[in-house]
Image (cartoon, rainbow, N blue to C red):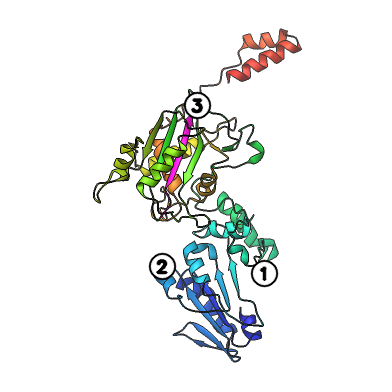
Amino acid sequence: LVMMCFRYPNLRALLLRRTMQDLRENHIRTLRKELAGAARYKADERAFLFANGSLLKLGYCDNDNDCLQYQGQEYDVICFEEATQMTEQWLTDIAACARGKRGDLKTRIYYTCNPGGPGHAYIKRLFVDGKRTKAENAFDWRFIRSFVQDNPHLDIEYTAFLETLPPARRRAWLEGDWNIFEGQVFEEFRDVPEHYGDRRWTHVITPFDIPKSWPVYRSFDYGYSKPFSVGWWAVDYDGRVYRISEWYGCRPGEPDTGIGLTYDKIVDGIIERESRAPLKGRDITGVADPAIAATENGPNFHETARRRGVYFKMGDHARVPGWAQVHQRLNFDEQGRPMMYIFSNCKDFIRTIPLQQYDKHKPEDVDTNGEDHIADETRYFCMMRPLKARDAPPPRREWTEFMRDMYDSADAAGRRELLEKWGEAQ
């Protein structure tokens, strides 16, 4: 930004960090030294004024009120430093200020960041996954991935430091893995397409016809301005659950934004979806957040649904035990099989579950400021069918002298059979 301010007269540039402390320690102090005699610093505006008329404004955004201070401002260039530390709403609102009309420079925005943080999903969608709306595709996008080895100013000691970080943070910061990051709640979740068929070491699998004898459940989390979520689950004879279908009331291209349906419209949608395969003709048990039965503000969702023949039991709202149940179902056994599978058509579960982060003030709980609606209805369902803690495995059988004699006296085929039976017994 500094070089652009020198090159282009009357340029208006904005550099943003999450907090004032970050701005002061990482930018203001350094730039005041580097630009001494080349640009005048105005402390009351937190801005550097260049001799050619260019301005470099230094700002921060740590909450919604901070975001409002940029409303109506206009810049030719904006740089979000550590962009993933800001929310999607702040990033998009402030980005609207990039509307300069210069003929010698195309208006642009720079985002520098690491995986993780409130803006992780937004940056990942735009740059890493390249999944943009039609409106977003009207702009040019460039994703430049870099690693610690690409920075010649960092020595081998810093690389060694990154090697010592906890696994999630190491994979994110050292290896640039955008699928896992520090603070991620459900680190165990895996979406591995090459194993959709054999269902090993993956939670996402290819859909199949559910046997008529398997019970089916419906879990629900209500939302109006925020998304609502309905999930349908089947349970096999071993107690393993399968998310076979879902309906996520989210505005297309606008994550965590509801579609504003009334109670009746949501019930209409549930009834319509349960009138066709794979749900048609099933006896479905519903579970939902107890808040749907609240009576403070007149008729509630529970009454509306019940009147139409759509029934819900009130779910167990215990949060930490509920997340423990979700974790327990996501864990893989020794054969690579979890107690929860997700059909590959449940796109919003697959998108949002990996994005859940821990609450900074409640380390065992999920941050409610995130897009947690599917996670919540999944929790209600898991608490309806809780798993017991896995029993300790039985002690290994001893290789007795009698069995040793049998092995020594057997031929090759007999020895193989004996070892196979021994393995099964363990």
Three-letter code for the amino acid on which mark 2 is drawn: Asp
SS for callout 3? loop
Q: Residue 419's spot in the image, x, y percent?
A: 67, 17
**Magenta range:** 226-238
Percent x, y for residue 231? Answer: 46, 40
Give the answer, above or below, for where 144 lies relative to 374: below
Q: Comparing marks 1 and 2, which lies closer to the viewer? A: 2
Q: Position of residue 173 (x, y in %)?
A: 60, 57
- Label number found at residue 270: none
Does any portion of residue 164 appear in the rendered image?
Answer: no
Rounded to the nearest angstrom, the CA distance separating label 1 from label 2 is 36 Å
Q: Helix, strand or loop at disc 2?
A: helix
Residue wearing tag 1:
153
With respect to residue 416, does 90 lie above or below? below
Mark 1: which secondary structure? loop
From the viewer's side, name the closer residue of 325 and 73. Answer: 73
Which amino acid does the dot numbered 1 rest on? His
Quadrant, the C terminus: top right
- Up-down relation of residue 420 to residue 16 (above or below): above
Q: Which residue position holds label 2?
A: 64
Asked if one can make out residue 365 in the rendered structure from this viewpoint, the answer is: yes
Dot 1 or dot 3, earlier in sequence:
1
Marks 1 and 2, the one that precedes in the sequence: 2
